[in-house]
């Protein structure tokens, strides 16, 4: 008979192997699902994972798009991972992303139609500030009134969505948009736009910021005392207190960083790929980033790879939908499987299977 | 040797099938909801199937559902253009900027944007239907059928098309029932069954017994079915599974003829950029069967109204009509022009509440 046995220390091998095994298992289970739907599973998997990267018709366009899609995911996930490591659960990155976009776009539109070099940097600061501010609400409520940051940060998302709707209908509405909701298109306002830095690469300031965030988080966690304190607070809160780590400061810091990064992601998205504030501007990056953070083992480099993988399933999934006629629900189920297998295989990091033969 | 021959044969076959695929005109569709929504997207997909039926193996169609309006739409459109689509129908208002941006990069591919107003390059056409004509008919039924004199309207987004629908419904309900009042609930979504059901529930709790909807799912009808005496209308699609009540009639979007016309024009080389806005007369808006839950005289009245709109003898926005603030919009006998309607951003007199600002 087979039994689970707790490992004395978490397995280093499985920590690395888990995501890879999870991806392989997802391909197998997803392939079976596609076959049941009457599609060729090999073709479907190839369309999702191979075509966006190497298909001669699409790759030149899809490959840069991976960066466009992965950029905000990585930027948000890196911020979230710091908090998650310290046991601080910011689930409301989606709301902070929205507020960053509103503050950033608002700062830029306030100057319209002025052309000046300082507008975009101001927008960046405003975007980070908007996200930070929105994250400070659950953070302060936690430190002062001991509320649960998971619930409060999540509920703040819905408030942000309503503010977004109100902004696109009122304050930020394009006065030349014949009454239709939505702000001016920032991509048509050069001083406030965040275009591709090198044409055809997908690289915009948001992607640059994501890479910088990955490197900064890596150094912070490996080399800085703060990184040590974050890790310690997550693994042994009592020991952390003896070590002189202030839980209040840590909550404010982790929520603040993750909020500011989510706000930045929103600002770069609204001034770049999305172009404008609209009622349904947000498409769930803040929530998907939670998956990315865990898929990347809360490790900055892991998050970088996980963000790219997640982006690949989105872009490949879109291709599979219209090339093969797969329903969009099948693609969502496929992405869900990825998280499911990841969590399931994760068991092997802390446990191992033991085969018992004979009578006990 | 044998292997080489096989490979060569395979290559020739692959080439031949690629060439055959080249001959087919590829028409692609981008949908905002799932094709199973039973409403808006479902009707567009029926139109796509009409294209397949009309042209057989001369065309090939592809579609993508649940495409968010915004940055994702731009990528989906670009990928479609790269995959060999020759004409792309983008079937939601929010695809407007994405459609125009991608169209500028692919001048040889035709883009058709539903319900928008931007045609920045020569390869972008726009098409819309005069849904407000259908709203006049359902508004009449609503005014006659309500017992509480309270009718409710589930709005999606406060854009002119939806405001037209709200105004047309109210004007015609009021015409047959001067005591009627209307409350509007904004759902800020085109398709979200849970939100739509909540909106319907909120309206019913306020005493509303006729629900008009501008969102795409059948959830409001399902909610109405739970409370006896509450009725509603099919939106975009017939929603026949809720017959004979709560669904007492429907406004059906009939996109098939337009899609067949445009793809046909592209096939025979007569295609040209245009802006289409047809209604009951042009067959783009159909009134679904009025069921026996509606008294015969009301049914006859509604059908007569539809006929008079269809033959052009009556326009749903005919004065005297005042704006909500009491100022005059249309003098006696005056008819609203299309420009005003396309940018409509005010309620008519008598509607409660404000358009979200």
Image (cartoon, rainbow, N blue to C red):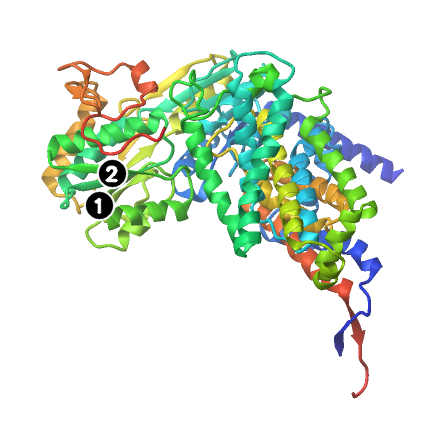
Q: Is residue A176 above or below residue B154?
A: above
Q: Is residue A341 left or right of residue A110?
A: right
- Secondary element type, mark 2: strand
Mark earlier in primary sequence (2, 1): 2
Camera sees residue A272 = no
The reply to whether the C-beta atoms of the residues labelled 2 and 1 are less than 8 Å apart is: yes
Rendering coords of residue B225 (x, y %):
27, 52
Residue extending farthest to the bottom is: A359
Residue at mark 2 to residue at mark 1: CA–CA distance: 8 Å
Rendering coords of residue B208 (x, y %):
21, 45
Tag 1: Cα neighbours inside 10 Å, few (<14), some, or many (≥20)? many
The subunit carrying tag 2 is B
Rendering coords of residue A298 (x, y %):
72, 50
- Secondary element type, mark 1: loop
Q: Is residue B277 left or right of residue B68?
A: left
The subunit carrying tag 1 is B
Q: Residue at x 86, y 39 (%)?
A: B2
From the image, which quarter does the N terminus of chain B lie in? Answer: top right
Residue designated by label 1: B208
Q: Residue at x 67, y 25 (%)?
A: B19
Residue designated by label 2: B183
Q: Is residue B231 above or below residue B266?
A: below
The number of discs equals 2
Camera sees residue B357 = yes
Q: Is residue A295 above or below residue B352?
A: below
Quarter-of-image position of residue A328:
top right
Residue extending farthest to the right is: B1
| Depth check, front residue: B192 or A330 | B192
């Amino acid at each position: 008979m087979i039994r689970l046995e707790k490992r004395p220390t978490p397995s280093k091998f499985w920590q690395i192997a888990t995501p890879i095994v999870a991806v392989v298992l997802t391909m197998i289970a997803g392939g079976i699902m596609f076959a049941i739907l009457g599609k060729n599973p090999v073709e479907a998997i190839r369309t999702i994972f191979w075509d966006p990267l190497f298909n001669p018709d699409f790759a030149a366009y899809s490959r840069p798009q991976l960066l466009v899609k992965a950029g905000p995911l990585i930027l948000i996930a890196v911020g979230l991972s710091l908090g998650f490591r310290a046991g601080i659960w910011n689930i409301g990155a989606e709301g902070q992303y929205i507020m960053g976009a509103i503050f950033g776009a608002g700062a830029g539109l306030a100057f319209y139609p002025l052309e000046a070099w300082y507008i975009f940097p101001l927008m960046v600061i405003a975007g980070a500030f908007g996200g930070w501010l929105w994250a400070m609400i659950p953070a302060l409520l936690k430190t002062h009134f001991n509320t649960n940051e998971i619930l409060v940060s999540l509920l703040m998302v819905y408030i942000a969505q309503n503010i977004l709707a109100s902004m696109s209908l009122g304050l930020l509405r394009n006065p030349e948009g014949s009454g239709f909701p939505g702000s001016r298109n920032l991509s048509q306002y050069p001083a406030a736009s965040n275009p591709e830095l090198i044409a055809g690469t997908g690289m915009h300031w948001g992607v640059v910021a994501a890479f910088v965030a990955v490197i900064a988080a890596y150094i912070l966690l490996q080399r800085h005392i703060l990184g040590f304190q974050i890790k310690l607070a997550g693994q042994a809160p009592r020991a952390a207190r003896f070590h002189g780590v202030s839980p209040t400061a840590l909550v404010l810091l982790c929520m603040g960083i993750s909020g500011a990064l989510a706000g930045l992601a929103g600002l770069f998205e609204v001034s770049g790929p999305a172009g404008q504030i609209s009622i349904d501007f947000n498409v769930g990056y803040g929530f998907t980033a939670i998956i990315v953070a865990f898929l990347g083992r809360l490790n900055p480099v892991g998050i970088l790879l996980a963000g790219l993988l997640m982006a690949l399933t989105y872009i490949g999934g879109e291709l599979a939908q219209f090339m093969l006629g797969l329903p969009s629900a099948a693609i969502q189920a496929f992405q869900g499987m990825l998280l499911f297998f990841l969590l399931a295989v994760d068991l092997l990091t802390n446990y191992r299977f033991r085969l018992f033969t004979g009578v006990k | 040797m044998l292997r080489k021959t096989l490979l060569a044969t395979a290559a020739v076959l692959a080439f031949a099938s690629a060439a055959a695929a080249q001959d087919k005109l590829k028409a692609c569709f981008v949908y905002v909801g799932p094709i199973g929504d039973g409403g808006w997207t479902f009707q567009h997909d029926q139109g796509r199937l009409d294209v397949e039926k009309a042209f057989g193996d001369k065309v090939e169609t592809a579609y993508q559902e649940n495409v968010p309006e915004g940055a994702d739409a731009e990528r989906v459109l670009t990928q479609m253009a790269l995959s060999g689509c020759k004409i792309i129908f983008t079937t939601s208002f929010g695809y407007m900027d994405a459609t125009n941006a991608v169209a500028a990069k692919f001048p040889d591919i035709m883009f058709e944007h539903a319900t928008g107003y931007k045609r920045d390059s020569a390869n972008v056409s726009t098409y819309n239907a005069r849904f407000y004509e259908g709203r006049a008919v359902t508004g009449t039924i609503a005014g006659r059928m309500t017992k509480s004199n309270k009718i409710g309207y589930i709005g999606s987004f406060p854009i002119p098309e939806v405001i037209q629908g709200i105004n047309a419904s109210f004007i015609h309900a009021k015409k047959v029932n001067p005591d009627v009042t209307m409350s509007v609930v904004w759902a800020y979504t085109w398709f979200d069954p849970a939100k739509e059901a909540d909106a319907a529930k909120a309206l019913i709790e306020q005493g509303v017994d006729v629900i008009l909807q501008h969102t795409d799912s059948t959830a409001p009808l399902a909610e109405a079915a739970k409370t006896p005496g509450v009725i509603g209308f099919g939106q975009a699609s017939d929603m026949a599974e809720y017959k004979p009540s709560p669904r007492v009639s429907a406004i059906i979007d009939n996109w098939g003829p337009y899609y067949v016309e445009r793809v046909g024009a592209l096939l025979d080389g007569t295609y040209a950029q245009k802006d289409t806005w047809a209604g009951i007369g042009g067959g783009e808006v159909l009134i679904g069967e009025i069921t026996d839950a509606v008294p015969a005289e009301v049914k006859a009245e509604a059908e007569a109204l539809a006929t008079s709109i269809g033959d052009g003898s009556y326009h749903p926005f005919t004065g005297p009509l005042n704006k909500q603030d009491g100022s005059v919009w249309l003098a006696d006998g005056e008819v609203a022009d299309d420009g005003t309607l396309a940018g409509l951003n005010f309620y008519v007199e008598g509607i409660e509440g404000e358009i979200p600002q």
